[in-house]
Image (spheres, rainbow, N blue to C red):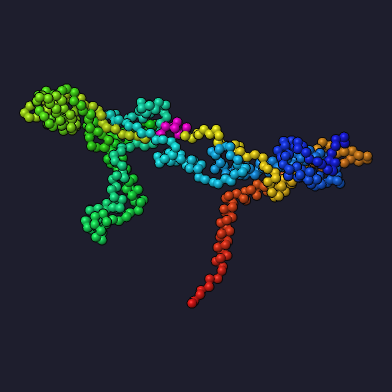
């Protein structure tokens, strides 16, 4: 140990003396490096005691202290601004930038709620017709989706089952008519709906209702279409739609049940013209516009399909004292349609993952570099000096721990290895805790709280100012 040179009392820093060389070419760092050596060794007892350190050991501790300070500072800035930084270009010069918070990522996060509620979001809703068949009550929507090109099994998630008639807003009429204020509504409310209100004429007498009232009316109309107008109610189990009551065909005009699909198969024979009455078959209400060439019926166009006709019915067309016959092809069993809106689970998954090869994607990707030593103010440098001392104290403790006692004539010297290491650890923990507390106190949240408190204190002070009443 005696043959290894130790601290001689002075030092001379040169670029390359630190392990990593992060700050070796910073003139301010070069100037402070030797001052830090003097500071550390004198705090450790030199020249009263020998310091078993070399200048390069202290330079290494100095470099580490600056790097730790920068890491703590940048970690705080990342925590403070990451919600804004995520997704930003990774090429930005973050150290020379001021980050202003925005709602971009918060809006991105909230899109998932809009997608689930059907009010927006980043996942599309798809629409699918469910043709109902007479006497069939259960419909496998996964299979139906597969038939319509959505081939991945069990990929659909049903969001809404509905019967859609007309947009509810189209049934609102005049938004200023309140609860039906027109020719009848105004009279019901005790207002002359014919002459208007105050002689302003038709449309002038209205009672403006709150917009939330209009929204409730629209919702009521939509639910009315889905529940009252629709012929069916339903329940869902594992994407199997069960319809109540059991669908039947041939009931036009009652919710989603459509008219029978009827087409003319055989050509007509006989004479006639125009729209004529129809007899025969199992149904009623069929009307055909026949066509003729030279007085002979050559065909016909269905004007009213009626209801209740069966496939193969032979019907007779009456007109102008002559008869014509047609054979009907009826889409037996058709019972209208319901609709479903659904989301593909694969769409939801893919919408949650955005490729961002040139973007900031994680906290370790925020492009902070090592701090510029010459830009650190005196408050920061003071912390760095103290942290350098703590590192050197710990280092010296480990060195002295190699020989707990040193024999001398008629006695031995016990070194203070344990005291140095314990003190160094306590000092490092205390310095880190104080630095983090300082950063937290300067966070955006704390600064806004302090500004609010200051405003409240000012208002309290102003409240104590006498309010003089002047009588002139």
The location of residue 346, given as percent across then percent down, is 45, 31
- Residue drawn at (18%, 33%), measured in percent from left and top? 304
The location of residue 439, given as percent across then percent down, is 64, 48
Instruction: Tell me if residue 209 comes above or below residue 8 in the rendering.
Output: below
Instruction: Tell me if residue 255 comes above or below residue 456 in the rendering.
Output: above
Instruction: Tell me if residue 20 comes above or below residue 187 in the rendering.
Output: above
Q: Can residue 386 be seen at all in this image of the molecule?
A: yes
Instruction: Tell me if residue 36 comes above or below residue 459 in the rendering.
Output: above
Q: Which residues are magenta?
A: 342-350
Q: Can residue 415 be seen at all in this image of the molecule?
A: no
Looking at the picture, tell me which residue is in the foreground, 202 or 213: 202
Q: Total of numbered circles in the picture?
A: 0
- Residue 397 lies within the magenta run: no
Q: Residue furthest left?
A: 321
Looking at the picture, tell me which residue is in the foreground, 281 or 187: 187
Looking at the picture, tell me which residue is in the foreground, 135 or 128: 128
Q: Residue furthest right?
A: 409
- Residue drawn at (12%, 28%), measured in percent from left and top? 317
């Amino acid at each position: 140990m005696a043959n290894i040179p130790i601290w001689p009392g002075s030092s001379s820093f040169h670029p390359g003396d630190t392990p990593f060389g992060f700050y070796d070419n910073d003139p301010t760092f070069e100037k402070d490096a030797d001052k830090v050596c003097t500071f550390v060794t004198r705090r450790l007892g030199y020249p009263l005691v020998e310091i078993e350190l070399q200048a390069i050991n202290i330079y290494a501790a100095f470099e580490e202290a600056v790097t730790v300070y920068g890491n703590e500072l940048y970690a705080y800035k990342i925590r403070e601004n990451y919600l804004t930084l995520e997704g930003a270009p990774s090429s930005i010069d973050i150290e020379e930038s001021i980050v202003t918070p925005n709602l971009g990522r918060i809006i991105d996060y909230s899109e998932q709620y809009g997608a689930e509620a059907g009010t927006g979001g980043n996942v599309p809703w798809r629409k699918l017709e469910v043709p109902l068949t007479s006497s069939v009550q259960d419909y496998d929507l996964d299979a139906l989706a597969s038939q319509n090109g959505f081939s991945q099994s069990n990929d659909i998630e049903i969001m809404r089952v509905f019967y859609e008639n007309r947009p509810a807003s189209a049934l609102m009429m005049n938004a200023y008519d309140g609860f039906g204020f027109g020719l009848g509504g105004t009279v019901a409310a005790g207002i002359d709906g014919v002459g208007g209100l105050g002689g302003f004429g038709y449309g002038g007498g209205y009672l403006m209702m709150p917009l939330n009232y209009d929204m409730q009316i629209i919702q009521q109309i939509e639910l009315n279409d889905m529940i009252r107008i629709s012929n069916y109610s339903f329940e869902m189990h594992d994407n199997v739609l069960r319809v109540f009551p059991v669908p039947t065909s041939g009931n036009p005009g009652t919710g989603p049940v459509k008219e029978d699909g009827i087409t003319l198969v055989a050509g007509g024979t006989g004479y006639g013209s125009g729209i004529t009455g129809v007899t025969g078959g199992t149904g009623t209400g069929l009307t055909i516009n026949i066509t003729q060439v030279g007085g002979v019926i050559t065909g016909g166009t269905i004007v009213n399909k009626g209801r209740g006709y069966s496939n193969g019915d032979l019907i007779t067309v009456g007109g102008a004292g002559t008869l014509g016959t047609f054979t009907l092809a009826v889409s037996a069993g058709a019972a209208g349609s319901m609709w479903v809106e659904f989301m593909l689970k694969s769409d939801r998954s893919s919408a949650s993952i955005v490729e961002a090869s040139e973007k900031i994607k994680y906290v370790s990707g925020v492009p902070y570099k090592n701090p510029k030593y010459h830009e650190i103010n005196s408050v920061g440098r003071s912390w760095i000096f103290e942290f350098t001392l703590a590192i050197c104290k710990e280092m010296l403790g480990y060195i002295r721990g190699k020989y707990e006692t040193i024999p001398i004539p008629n006695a031995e010297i016990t070194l203070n290895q344990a005291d140095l290491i314990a003190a160094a650890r306590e000092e490092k923990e205390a310095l880190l805790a104080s630095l983090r507390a300082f950063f937290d106190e300067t966070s955006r949240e704390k600064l806004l709280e302090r500004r609010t408190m200051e405003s409240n204190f000012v208002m309290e002070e102003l409240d104590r100012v006498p309010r003089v009443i002047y009588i002139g």
